[in-house]
Amino acid sequence: MSPQDRLSIVLVDDHAIVRQGLRSILDREEDMHVVGEAATTAEARTALERLRPRIVLLDLKLGTGSDTEGLDLCSEITSGYPEVGVLVLTTFLDDAYVLEAVHRGAKGYVLKDVDTSELVSSIRTVACDGNAFDSRSASVMARSIRTTPNAPALTEREQRVLELLASGLSNRTVGTTLFISETTVKFHVRNIMRKLGASTRAEAVYEASKMGVI
């Protein structure tokens, strides 16, 4: 297979050893070629503009302290480069992250402990404009689909955050209670408010009470 016929891939991960490992795995596939790497959002933007890859393997946590940077980058890629397929490859399995990544245009979501053959298969699926999820993220999608039409599709974590908000706890206290960062709590609160059609935390609690969610 000629180089131009191979699937061009850019790796976006803040850990060099992870990128090196992925490159060594993927470059062994005759139909794949890692054409670039990025450790930050800025590097990813440069690589995308210069290389125009077919696939981006994207980690959601890029080491800046922001829990949403990878999701924001996903939005940038899918809106600015619609021909690029984004496959999230991360260590985070949280309903909110899976659903939000898909909402922002990701074609797939797999965890880093995925089997090599499954990862390769997922990349090929995304390259064919399909959707690829490992068994655990697929379960998240299934739970979302099963949510009744009249109720907001809150994830388990969002439901718990909402219950704590209803108890009058601050974002910081909610984070301490759930062992997550305050930034992550804010992320969940934004999603809760969006799903409930609320503009404030108090309104979200009120709407959830009316719907019988809490």
Image (tube, helix red, strand yellow):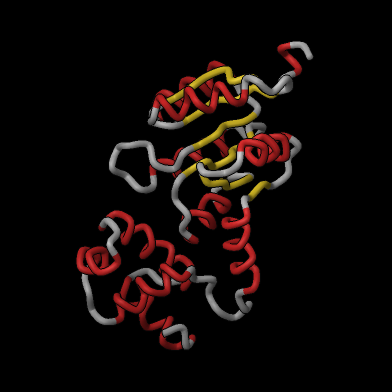
Task: Pick the residue in front: 123 or 81.
Answer: 123
Task: Check the picture and name the quadrant holding the N terminus.
Answer: top right
Task: Pick the residue in front: 120 or 181.
Answer: 120
Q: Is residue 105 visible to us here?
A: no
Which residue shows up at 62% across the image and 79% down it?
148
Which residue shows up at 57% across the image and 46% down it?
110
Task: Pick the residue in front: 83 or 85.
Answer: 85
x, y percentage for residue 124? 72, 35
x, y percentage for residue 210? 45, 88
Which residue shows up at 52% across the image and 46% down it?
111
On screen, residue 81 versus residue 95, left or right, reads right
Which residue shows up at 71% across the image and 12% down it?
3
Q: Is residue 195 visible to us here?
A: yes
> Picture quarter containing residue 125?
top right
x, y percentage for residue 81? 60, 32
Task: Check the picture and name the quadrant holding the C terminus.
Answer: bottom left
On screen, residue 151 versus residue 61, left or right, reads right
Q: Is residue 57 above or below residue 214?
A: above
x, y percentage for residue 165? 29, 75
Q: Is residue 105 above or below residue 35?
A: below
On screen, residue 78 versus residue 179, left or right, reads right
